[in-house]
Each structure stands twice: as structure tokens, then as C-alpha cells.
Amino acid sequence: MNEEQKTMALQVGVTVLILLAAMTIGEYFIGLFAPYWWAPLMAIALLKAFYIVRDYMHIGRVFAGDEAEEHS
């Protein structure tokens, strides 16, 4: 992995971290002021789970095969 790819991966990681923090704050206030709005809360939770699995658990590497492991 070259320096440009590392920089891009770091930028994506930080952006997703900020996005997750903003969604968590939004969830908190929805839960605080409108606890019966379960549908938006569930949608936000599913979206957060998607980003966590995609960007932090590196699930793509599991299905990428041996070629991706050689370049890690």
C-alpha cells in the first residue's frame, strides 16, 4: 500500500468516524425527545452498522481472496 492509498484510507476512516458520531448524537436526541419514533432510530442503527462493517471490520478482505492479502 503506497502513501497515497494510506492517506486516502485515513481520510475515509476519519470521515466515517465523524459521520458515526453525528448519527449517534442524532439517535440520542430522537430517543430523548421522541422515544416512540422507533422507525428512524432503527434506520439510523442499520446505517451505522453498515458503515462499521464496511469500513472498520474490513469485511471486503474476507471475500477478496489471496491477491488482496499479498498487498496488505
Image (cartoon, grey):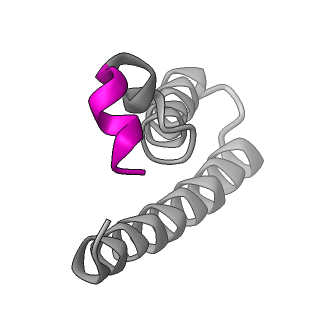
Q: Nearer the viewer, residue 42 or 63?
A: 63
Q: Give the residue displayed 47% in from the left and 73% down from the top.
A: 14
State whether residue 57 is above or below residue 30: above
Secondary structure mostly seen in magenta is helix
Picture quadrant where residue 11 is located: bottom left
Q: Give the residue displayed 35% in from the left and 25% down from the top.
A: 66
Q: Nearer the viewer, residue 56 or 15?
A: 56
Q: Give the residue displayed 41% in from the left and 31% down from the top.
A: 61
Horizontal relation, residue 8 to residue 16: left or right: left
The extreme left residue here reads 4
Horizontal relation, residue 14 to residue 9: left or right: right
Query: Residue 20, how many percent across, how many down?
Result: 54, 57
Q: Nearer the viewer, residue 23 or 31?
A: 23
The extreme right residue here reads 32
Query: Residue 6, how many percent across, how many down?
Result: 36, 74
Q: Give the residue displayed 60% in from the left and 23% down from the top.
A: 38
Residue 56 is inside the magenta segment: no
Query: Residue 65, how many percent across, how many down?
Result: 33, 20
The magenta region covers: 64-72
Q: Considering the image in quadrants, where does the N terminus appear?
A: bottom left
State whether residue 51 is above or below residue 53: below
Residue 69 is inside the magenta segment: yes
Picture quadrant where residue 41 is located: top right
